[in-house]
């Protein structure tokens, strides 16, 4: 470990927030593609996380997701985001069919201490107090591998999720701390829960500052229960 | 199979759709209204000098506050017991668009502070005699048409009272063993449909005062009627069925809906003509889609009332919002979202609810009550906080209808009196006097018709 260049392994709060919100952007795109919410033709392939990822080319969806991620970044940097949920609903009945749940655990210490020095200088001490930002280490590669695993799981989820055989729409919910001022583009909402859902836990990833757990819950298929 | 592009547009209806936002319909409206109201509210609060003005609604919450209050009531804690806020992303603000939605218009008007205060009348503006008005909860005997003529059935006769010049005309008198049980004006105000206890429905030309045709579709009295804009007439009967008629075609019955098990006493088409609400003596409310009238498959069935429902009213400013009121055993006004089929609010009024009318100029709803408080009540929407009561009738108030300009409400009660109330009138502009009922130009002028 000691032989590595230190600056590469350091993740700042801001960097972590960017990684996490970027992940949400790609994850949302991937879910929309894999669940067929928008037609295949409106997506193009890019390489990301060592995987071919699909990104929507539809201007409306694009601007929606970019608006979304920029707000999420802001909240992540402030450590005020607890959870992001992508809800897939039937267009006709607004019935919630699937919830893609991303819970976020933020390292409170990092957020409180605020600014993290980009450069580590372990030796700087003033008096008897050690004055330095909290520094968490984890290599980019490791994080990327974890995200890659989640993305693979999202893509493979179509094998067990029930078919969405009707036109669907999606909503994005954010669970934030109570003291967050509601931005202009957001409004308070109910949880849009699914009654008696099936749940599948997916992999999680951890930047050492933000830990993201992924869970998909979906409508119980009455059909095979009886 | 439609082309992929069409599918995309189809699905975009709710989720982001930058270019197609304007014609997307209603999905984005609540967001805007919430946001704008918040702004309006805060700008109002910052001007305390208005406190001394005519504040006739002190404790009433704006929809935003009401919503917040309710969210906070049902506050949830996360797994660690930490309070949290749930937010939903609604895309980027689209300020550049001209406001074409009615709600925007309403909100714009609401921001003018003068619109928030108005004097409410203490007594009826005008009282007419209504001898022999049948005291029957299940009948709908009065309707005020778009041509500004009030049709009211008194005993065996149907009278037309012209609100512009107070002239009365006798339209019809039925046979001795028969009497009108329901009256409804067509949307254009030129035709009036009359249901009878003998189960027939007559269509009358109100200009020529001539009968146009007779529709037979039921086996018992027809207590409720409702027209849509495209000459479709729906009739509800004591035989528990609802018939849809195309009054222009020879075989007029286009479909029959059988889902109620009691007399259908409330029937209302929504403003857009896409949804039909029916209320029955079986304590049920059904919502039907105009596109799926072929089968007796309803869109929603509301079972929350515990008495007959004859009071039904669609919200004129919020699509797919229905208000319903129950009878003596129920006494509740309930607000429904016909999109989701959920009850969004309910209030026990303490009296039989006979009729409901929405205010088209303010977010308010007026209810008429019978046993045991014979009064009209004005409620704020969506909080359902009571604004005031209007008393004057001495027996149960059975019928309500509002004038074409939405300023005046007429009530007919079992005390055989017909009272006119200027409850919905917007505050008059400073420079001009308020219009009288005998001033037809003013009354029907488009300037005053904020919504339609």
Image (spheres, helix red, strand yellow):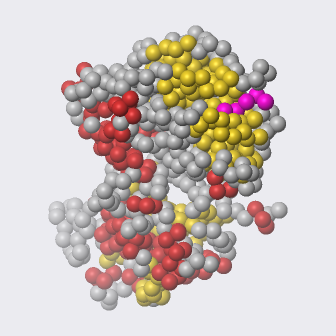
- Asked whether B85 or B360 is in front, the reply is B360
**Residue B140 drawn at (x, y percent):** 65, 28
Q: Residue furthest left?
A: A126
- Asked whether A98 or A3 is in front, the reply is A98
Viewed as shown, does residue A207 lie left or right of B263? left
- Asked whether B386 or B278 is in front, the reply is B278
**Residue A179 drawn at (x, y percent):** 36, 48
Q: Quadrant of the N terminus of chain A?
A: bottom left
Q: Quadrant of residue B45?
A: top left
Identified at 45% across, 61% down, the residue is B24
Viewed as shown, does residue B383 lie left or right of A136? right
Residue stretch in magenta: B194-198
Question: Residue B326, can we see it?
Answer: no
Identified at 53% across, 82% down, the residue is A40
B300 in magenta: no
- Asked whether B147 or B420 is in front, the reply is B147
Q: Quadrant of the C terminus of chain A?
A: bottom right
**Residue B58 drawn at (x, y percent):** 36, 24
- Residue B53 higher or lower than B16, as above or below: above
**Residue A191 drawn at (x, y percent):** 53, 53
Q: Main secondary structure of the magenta part?
A: strand
């Amino acid at each position: 470990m000691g032989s590595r260049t230190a600056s590469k392994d350091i993740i700042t709060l801001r960097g972590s927030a960017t990684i996490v919100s970027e992940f949400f952007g790609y994850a949302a795109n991937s879910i929309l593609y894999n669940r067929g919410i928008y037609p295949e033709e409106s997506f193009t392939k890019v390489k990301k996380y060592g995987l071919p990822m699909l990104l929507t080319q539809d201007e409306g969806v694009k601007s929606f997701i970019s608006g979304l991620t920029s707000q999420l970044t802001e909240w992540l940097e402030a450590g005020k985001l607890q959870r992001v949920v992508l809800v897939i609903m039937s267009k006709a009945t607004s019935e919630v069919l699937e919830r893609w749940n991303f819970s976020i655990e933020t390292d409170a210490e990092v957020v409180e201490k605020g600014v993290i020095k980009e450069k580590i200088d372990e030796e700087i001490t003033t008096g008897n107090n050690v004055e330095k930002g909290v520094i968490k280490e984890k290599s980019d590669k490791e994080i990327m591998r974890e995200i890659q695993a989640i993305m693979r799981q999202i893509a493979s989820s179509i094998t067990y999720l029930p078919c969405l055989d009707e036109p669907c729409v999606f909503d994005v919910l954010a669970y934030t701390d109570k003291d967050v001022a509601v931005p202009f583009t957001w409004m308070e909402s109910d949880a849009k829960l699914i009654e008696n859902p099936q749940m599948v836990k997916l992999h999680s990833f951890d930047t050492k500052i933000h830990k993201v757990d992924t869970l998909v819950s979906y409508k119980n298929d009455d059909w095979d229960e009886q | 199979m439609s082309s992929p592009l069409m599918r995309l547009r189809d699905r975009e209806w709710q989720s982001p759709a930058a270019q197609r936002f304007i014609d997307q319909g209603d999905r984005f409206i609540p967001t805007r209204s919430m946001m704008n109201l918040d702004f309006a509210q805060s700008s109002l609060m910052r001007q305390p000098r208005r406190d001394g003005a005519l504040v006739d609604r002190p404790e009433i919450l704006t929809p935003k506050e009401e919503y917040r209050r309710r969210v906070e009531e049902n506050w949830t804690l996360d797994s660690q017991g930490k309070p949290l806020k749930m937010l939903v992303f609604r895309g980027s603000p689209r300020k550049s668009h001209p406001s074409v939605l009615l709600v925007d218009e309403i909100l714009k008007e609401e921001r003018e502070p003068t619109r928030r205060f108005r004097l409410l009348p203490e007594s009826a503006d005008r009282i007419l005699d209504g001898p022999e008005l049948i005291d029957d909860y299940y009948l709908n005997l009065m309707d005020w048409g778009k041509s500004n003529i009030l049709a009211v059935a008194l005993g065996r006769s149907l009278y037309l009272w012209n609100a512009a010049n107070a002239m009365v005309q006798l339209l019809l008198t039925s046979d001795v063993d028969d009497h009108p049980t329901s009256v409804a004006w067509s949307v254009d105000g030129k035709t009036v449909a009359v249901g009878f206890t003998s189960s027939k429905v007559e269509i009358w030309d109100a200009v020529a005062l001539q009968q146009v045709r007779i529709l037979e579709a039921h086996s018992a009295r027809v207590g409720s009627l409702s027209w849509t804009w495209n000459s479709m007439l729906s009739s509800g009967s004591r035989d528990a069925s609802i018939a849809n008629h195309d009054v222009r075609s020879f075989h007029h019955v286009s479909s029959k809906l059988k889902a109620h098990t009691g007399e259908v006493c409330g029937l209302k088409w929504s403003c857009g003509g896409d949804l039909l609400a029916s209320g029955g003596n079986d304590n049920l409310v059904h919502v039907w889609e105009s596109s799926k009238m072929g089968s007796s498959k309803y869109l929603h069935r509301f079972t929350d009332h515990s008495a007959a429902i004859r009071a039904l009213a669609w919200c004129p400013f919020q699509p797919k919002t229905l208000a319903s009121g129950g009878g003596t055993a129920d006494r509740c006004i309930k607000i429904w979202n016909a999109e989701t089929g959920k009850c969004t609010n309910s209030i026990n009024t303490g009296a039989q609810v006979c009729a409901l009318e929405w205010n088209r100029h303010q977010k308010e709803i007026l209810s008429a009550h019978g046993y045991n408080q014979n009064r009209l009540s004005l409620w704020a929407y969506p909080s359902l906080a009571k604004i005031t009561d209007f008393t004057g009738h001495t027996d149960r108030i059975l019928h309500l209808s509002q004038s074409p300009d939405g300023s005046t409400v007429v009530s007919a009660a079992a005390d055989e009196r017909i009272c006119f109330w200027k409850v919905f009138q917007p505050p008059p502009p400073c420079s001009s006097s308020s219009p009288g009922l005998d001033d037809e130009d003013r009354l029907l002028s488009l300037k005053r018709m904020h919504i339609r």
